[in-house]
Image (spheres, helix red, strand yellow):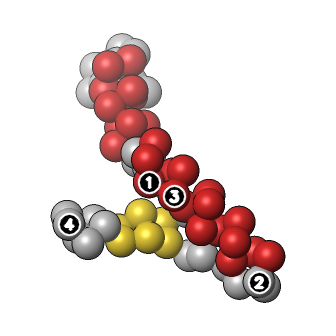
Amino acid sequence: MPNKEGYPDPTAERAIRAAGRMPMHIFNAYNFVNGVAERLGFEIIGLRDRKTGKEYRR
């Protein structure tokens, strides 16, 4: 990802990618819940953390 001057900026690129990822403990919970829901014929769209209010969509 180039900066304003056109030079590569790997630090900013890593930060932007990391900001869009689910934390590992949320990802593991999502996979578990989605696996159970899939067996029952449902699909999980997203999760919301009650403590922080942050929503995670997949």
Tell whether label 1 touches label 3 (CB within 8 Å): yes
The crowd level at tag 1 (other Cα within 10 Å; few <14, some 14-19, many 20+) is some
The first of marks 2 and 4 along the sequence is 2
Q: In the rendered image, which quarter is residue 7 located in?
A: top left
**In the image, is residue 25 above or below residue 17?**
below
Q: Gap in Å between the C-alphas at discs 3 and 1?
A: 5 Å
- Where does label 2 land, which residue? 40
Read off the residue under disc 4: 51
| Residue at the (32%, 19%) spot, across then down | 11
Label 2 near label 1: C-beta < 8 Å? no
> In the figure, 4 relative to 28: above or below?
above
- Residue type for callout 1: Ile
Task: Inspect this view and state whether residue 52 appears.
Answer: yes
Which image quarter: residue 6?
A: top left
**Residue corresponding to mark 1:** 26
Q: Circle 4 sits in a helix, a strand or a loop, which is it?
A: loop
Q: Residue at x 54, y 50 (%)?
A: 28
